[in-house]
Image: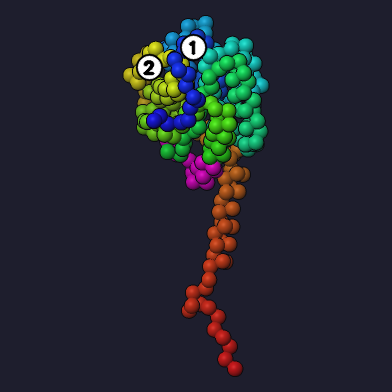
Amino acid sequence: MREGFTQTPDPLPRRAVRLAVLGDSTAVGLGDPVPGGSWRGVGPFVAEALGIPPAGYLNTAFTGARMRCVRTDQLPAALRHRPDVAVVIVGMNDTLRSDFDSLGMARDLEHVVTALQAVGATVVTMRFHDHSRVFRLPGPLRRALTARIAELNDVIETIARRHGVACLDLGSLPGAYDLAAWSVDRLHPSELGHRLLARGVTELVADAGIAVPAPVSLVCSGGVTPRTVDHVGWLVVKGIPWLWRRGRDLLPYAAAIVARSALESWRARRAEPLEPELAPRPVER
């Protein structure tokens, strides 16, 4: 049985002719550069597997998008497209911000999912993996981000189950934690990683009763292979500044986690019974 939970399939596979991809930089295709300076990524791989014609493919995603952005800025165009399949990849940018709001995210995602279903789309969402296994952060920031991702995943799973949409579990995806699946920044999938995502998406789409004429290949081709200098260049030009900006956003939350942990430890120690040799002796009269 494949990872994730799926919609009840129709008796006979049906062909999809329109695909919409909504979300953030992963949905844009960052991490899978192609000659000419553009990005490819999960969307085109899914479109190719489903046999979607060029006119039937729409990608509304943009870098930095948050859950609210998908609802307000991307959903209207996706609804006009009336997709047979819609892939929604969003939420990580929310986890990195100081105004993280899981309740607001749940409302936005539910609106997006139900609106897409209302125009006949089979919707695929994604729950996220443990980023700390591929992107190293200082302890407090790592714990803060892990807690945020857990909240985000709870939101995504709840909405997916409530409305019967497919949800791809990236943490359980075979190969998800291989470094080869990640680009130089360790935040976005590499070409191989995007192919893994696309294969996972199309398997769930097939489970939902949609034909997949050409399964996604995991053999990389057509992309640009990053060089060692690209790794160093990214770290200096983008990696360190990004870590500084997002670290500042997460720092108050990280500090709260550390303080709460210290308080819980102190309370636990206070509640422990004293050792016999340390217990106060009765006063002799």
Say above or below: 6 vs 120. below
Q: Which of 115 and 101 is in front in this view?
A: 115
The kind of residue tagged 1 is: Ala
- Dots 2, 1 in contact, CB < 8 A: no
Who's the residue at 38% across and 13% down the image? 214
Q: Is residue 89 shown above or below 120?
A: below
Membership of 138 in magenta stretch: yes
Residue marked by disc 1: 16
In the rendered image, the quadrant that contains the N terminus is: top left
Q: N-terminal of the two: label 2 or label 1?
A: 1
Instruction: Find residue 70 and name its label.
Output: none
Crowding at dot 2, Cα within 10 Å, few <14 / some 14-19 / many 20+, comes out as: some
Identify the residue at the far front of this view.
11
Q: Residues within 10 Å of mark 1 (few under 14, many from 20)?
A: many
Query: x and y percent of residue 82 in the render?
Result: 59, 12
Q: Residue at x 65, y 30 (%)?
A: 107
Q: Does the magenta stretch include residue 226?
A: no
Quarter of the image where the C terminus is located: bottom right
Q: In what element is the residue under mark 2?
A: loop
Tell me the chief SS of the magenta region: helix
* Magenta span of residues: 134-147
The answer to whether residue 156 of the structure is visible from this angle is no
Can see residue 134? Answer: yes
Q: Residue at x 64, y 16 (%)?
A: 76
User: To which quarter of the image does residue 67 belong?
Assistant: top right
* 183 and 162: which is toward the camera: 162
